[in-house]
């Protein structure tokens, strides 16, 4: 049994380049709004507009930006702290 991890699921960005690999999977390089770059297979890419600033669909709260582990932990701790203050 092999578990597949989808680390780029829900990420939104601008397509920077496409690498063609005949006989294998084509790779697309994407850059998000905070200049993080990542690569994924072309089959995993879905175009939602001509620019990252004018999508043709509504986006979730975080706009498809994946936080680093440290940033995500800090955000969660801040939310917990806010809820504790509100319950006093």
Image: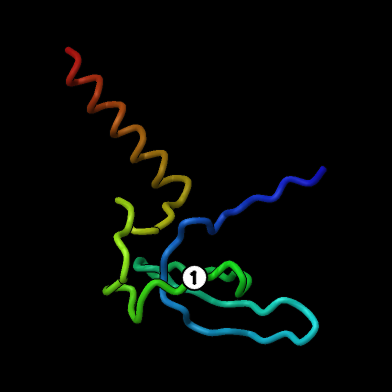
Q: Secondary structure at mark 1?
A: loop
Along the viewing direction, whichever of 57 and 60 lies nearer the viewer? 57
Q: What residue does disc 1 label? A: 46
Place residue 47 in its image quadrant.
bottom left
The residue closer to the viewer here, 31 or 50, is 50
Left or right, 32 with reference to 83: right
How is colour applied across the structure in the image?
rainbow
Res 49 → quadrant: bottom left
Q: Where is residue 72, by image quadrant?
A: top left
Q: Is residue 7 above or below residue 40?
A: above
Mark 1 neighbour density, 10 Å: few (under 14) some (14–19) many (20 or more): few
Quadrant showing the C terminus: top left
Q: Residue at x 33, y 73 (%)?
A: 52
Image: 39 above or below 79: below
Q: Compared with residue 61, is residue 21 higher up or lower down, i.e. above or below?
A: below
Image quadrant where one finds the N terminus: top right
Residue 13: image location, x then y, percent:
41, 70
**Where does residue 41 sit, x and y in percent of width and height?**
63, 71
């Amino acid at each position: 049994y092999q578990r597949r991890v989808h680390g780029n699921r829900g990420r939104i960005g601008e397509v920077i380049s496409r690498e063609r690999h005949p006989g294998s999977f084509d790779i697309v390089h994407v850059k998000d709004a905070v200049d993080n770059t990542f690569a994924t297979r072309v089959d995993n890419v879905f175009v939602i507009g001509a620019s990252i600033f004018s999508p043709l669909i509504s986006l979730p709260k975080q706009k498809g930006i994946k936080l680093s582990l440290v940033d995500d932990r800090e955000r969660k701790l801040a939310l917990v702290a806010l809820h504790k203050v509100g319950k006093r």
